[in-house]
Amino acid sequence: TIEGKGQLIISAFAKSLEVVPQQLCDNAGFDATDILSALRRKHAMDEDGTWYGVDIEAGSICDTFESGVWEPSDNKRNSLGAAAEAACVILSIDETVVNPRSQDPGGAAGQQQQMQQQKPMSNMMGNAMDAVNAQHGGSRSGNLGNGVSYLKGRGGG
């Protein structure tokens, strides 16, 4: 067993992997809650439950190894690695997109003044915003769309 904050990370990662069987159930028209519950129970209680997955033909769970449903481990490793890398990139973005109208009424004017005084952004998010603004025929003005502006730095600071 893993102790401390590490168990929270592993728990969250494991929960994110449940999207795959849930989506299979939804796409096949079955109740994902019942099937995922049976799948969790099988994985937790039965030593032979390792290979169990969603049976989209019967609307239940089955031993996928016996059913001939195999997935190459290279595909799984590449997919999980790419997903983890994408999550790290998303978490490292320095800009925050803010809708001034969602803030307090007096703060919107102050935020716009702050945006005009800041240096231009230099990382991936800034480049993406430049591309969007170029498509709309203008330079970066601090606005991403109707009523949506950006601020430099984490948390808008």
Image (cartoon, rainbow, N blue to C red):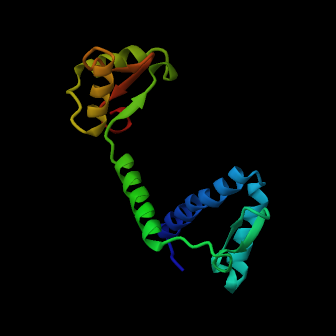
Q: 90 or 48, which is in the foreground?
A: 48
Q: Residue at x 45, y 17 (%)?
A: 147
Q: Residue at x 21, y 27 (%)?
A: 120
Relative to 119, 30 lies left or right: right
Left or right, 68 with respect to 33, comes to: left
Q: Residue 142: x percent and y percent?
A: 31, 20
Q: Quadrant of residue 131?
A: top left
Give above or below for 121 relative to 45: above
Quadrant, the N terminus:
bottom right
Q: Is residue 151 left or right of residue 2?
A: left
Residue furthest to the front in view is 68
Left or right side of 121 for 100: right
Q: Position of residue 59 (x, y in %)?
A: 78, 62
- In the rendered image, residue 32, in percent from the top left (x then y), is placed at 74, 56
Name the foreground residue: 46 vs 74.
Answer: 74
Figure quadrant of residue 130: top left
Which quadrant does the C terminus fall into? Answer: top left
Decide: is 95 above or below 6. Answer: above
Residue 137, quarter of the rendered image: top left
